[in-house]
Image: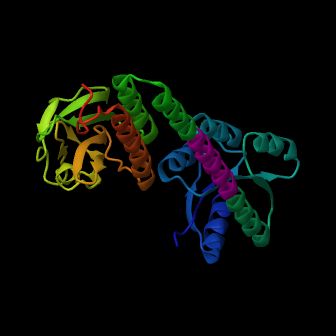
Amino acid sequence: MTTETVLIIDDSAEIRSLLESLLPFAGYETLSAGTGWEGLGLAFHARPDVLLLDLELPDIGGLKILEQLNRANLSIPSVIMTGYGSEGVAAKALRLGALGYLIKPFTAEEVLATVEKALTMGRLVRERASLSALVDRQTRYLQALSTLSQALVNSTDCDLLFQRIVDAAQYMTRADSSWLSLRQDEGTRFRVVAQRGKTGCTSLEFCETSGSENVSSVLTQGSPVRVQAASGTSIRLQTEDKVKALLQMPLCLPEVTLGLLSVDRRESDVPFSEQDQELLQILASYVLLALERNRQPGQGAESTR
């Protein structure tokens, strides 16, 4: 379990020494600063789990520190330390996001209880924000899939539908680029039929074995590919483009792979997730449905172009 870190910002060496001695006995690591600017720098650099902040500092007040943290969108559970008669200022600190305050002189029990309470409240705030973001993201995904489903039912323009699917793939996986390729006739050549991204595909046509060795299985074996480049290296796509993270989903029928749906990251090496793979699989199934619906009697599944 990771040890939680408490940053102490107080110009009193006695207070800092007391807290630096007390908190480790409760399992916390400590950092300390005697001035506001020094403490603010530590807060940005170390990202502590809790901040114990004196309101009265010689250079920059505790309220200003809270304002700076809020302006930088840096959320650190904070506890204000103040003397008797400063409760009004402490109330302002609470409005700026502080989760509690300690009135000097305080006891060891008060410190530990307040720090634990701040940690608990901080966790709840983060969990609520995470849950809210998840609900928002899932809602947007469902809306995008619903729009695609309606287009699949109502549209007779495969080119337009393919472009919408590629757009959705980039949007839903937060990719830099996305593209769709389909097999040409009965041969081993594939062609990019829709794409989205800052830069277009370098090569619009390729064969089954094009690209780096670790991506060829998507067409030769009909297996999804989800890979991340090692540090300082890149992955070469079938289109000859080089990327840092890649997710590709084959468009498979029982005896043939009709093409692939691809998303990639070219500026970031953040890997794609299992959820991204599940989303891409759903979008790939939409492509197969569109191909099946538009297949002419007596012909094999092929590109509509």
Q: Is residue 214 toward the left or the right of residue 4 in the image?
A: left
Q: Is residue 190 toward the left or the right of residue 265 in the image?
A: left
Q: Does 60 appear above or below 22? A: above
Q: Does 48 appear above or below 287? A: below
* Residue positioned 14% across, 32% down in the render: 205
Q: Position of residue 71 (x, y in %)?
A: 60, 34
Q: Position of residue 304 (x, y in %)?
A: 27, 28
Residue 285 sits in quarter: top left
Q: Position of residue 302 (x, y in %)?
A: 23, 35
Q: Is residue 5 toward the left or the right of residue 259 in the image?
A: right
From the viewer's side, name the closer residue of 21 and 45: 45
* Residue positioned 56% across, 64% down in the render: 30
* Residue positioned 48% across, 28% down in the render: 151
What range is drawn magenta here? Answer: 122-139
Q: Is residue 134 magenta?
A: yes
Residue 197 sits in quarter: top left
Q: Is residue 129 magenta?
A: yes
**Residue 76 showing in the rendered view:** no
From the viewer's side, name the closer residue of 103 and 205: 205
> Is most of the magenta stretch helix, strand or loop?
helix
From the viewer's side, name the closer residue of 235 and 275: 275
